Image (cartoon, rainbow, N blue to C red):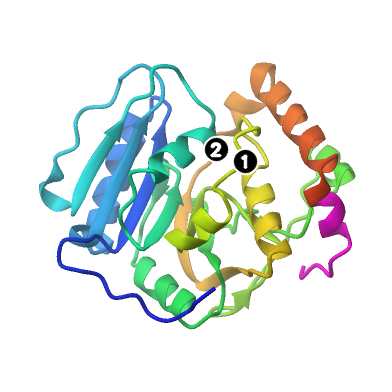
Amino acid sequence: MRSEPIATTQNQPLISVSIVSHRDGDQLQVLLESLATHEPAERIQLLVTDNLGHDLPEIQPASWHSVVMLRPARPRGFASNHNAAFQSATGPFFCVLNPDVIFEGSVFLRLIQRLDQGKGHIVSPLIVDSQGNVLDSFRGLPTAWELVRRGIGGSGFNPAPAHGLLVRPDWIAGTFMLMRSETFSHLGGFDARYRLYLEDVDLCTRARLMGLSILVDAGLQLRHDPRWASRRAGRYLLWHLQSAFRFFASDVYRRARGMNTHV
């Protein structure tokens, strides 16, 4: 796929940012304030999906290139929501972004430079918590045993990347994923058969099988304080198990096991 810099017209946004809210109004407000503070808001198209009950206020479009509010008739999964939002995306770059992320500096333009330089095709900054700890938002190709070990409290994640290092993992989390819109289209978007978990792993694995590369720029970072408690049992656990079974039984995983992983 091409890696030449993209020129945009005056009426075209640079980046289409897809955010899905599940009653995350307060977090979304903080995110948008930080985004407008540190990034070129006038070049950003916001694609905001209100997935649970029309609980978000209208976003004033004045600060942004444009705002598209999406309110599905019934709740949809992570993959389906971002795929649907992409249908309204008009920017040459597409970003999947969690509503509970906070920008503490500029990351978009530097990451776009990485894309233009051909350093990677799906890129992310480091994701850290409020104490500055690096979160496990990037990893090597998972195994079933690894997911079991993490489920009982054993993470084993210790990246300790040096400042400015370009990390090349096998996948990055859907907390933040930036790519050219043509890349997302070329991949066919997320696999909507996944409800909430492993969509990001599947997307990145399919990308690598197509010769595309995954990149984390450790010289950049965003803050994210994940809320794990709501996803330890009940339907979230069921969705996780269903997604894990689907991924590990897939031809995508079988073929990826034959590749040389990076981390």
Position of residue 30 in the picture relative to residue 262 (left or right): left
Q: Which quadrant does the N terminus fall into?
A: bottom right
Of callouts 1 and 2, the N-terminal one: 2
Q: Which residues are magenta?
A: 253-263
Q: Which quadrant does the C terminus fall into?
A: bottom right
Circle 2: is it few (<14), some (14-19), or many (20+) Cα within 10 Å?
A: many
- Are dots 1 and 2 in contact, CB under 8 Å? yes
Looking at the picture, tell me which residue is in the foreground, 1 or 25.
1
Q: Amino acid at mark 2?
A: Ala
Residue 147 x/y as whole percent: 81, 41
Whether residue 222 is situated above or below residue 114 in the rendered picture: above
Q: Which residue is drawn at the image coordinates 48% and 83% (left, top)?
A: 117
Q: Amino acid at mark 1?
A: Asp
Q: Which residue is drawn at the image coordinates 39% and 62% (left, top)?
A: 93
Query: Does the magenta portion include 86?
Result: no
Q: How many angstroms separate mark 1 from mark 2 (CA)? A: 6 Å
Looking at the picture, tell me which residue is in the foreground, 252 or 150.
252
Position of residue 7 in the picture relative to residue 18 (left or right): left
**Can residue 131 be seen in this snapshot?**
no
Q: Which residue is drawn at the image coordinates 80% and 67% (left, top)?
A: 261
**Can residue 73 be seen in this snapshot?**
yes
Whether residue 26 is situated above or below residue 96 in the rendered picture: above
Residue 241 x/y as whole percent: 77, 28
Residue 154 x/y as whole percent: 81, 44
Residue located beneath label 2 in the image: 79
Q: Which residue is drawn at the image coordinates 49% and 53% (left, top)?
A: 176
Residue located beneath label 1 in the image: 191
Q: Which mark is residue 66?
A: none
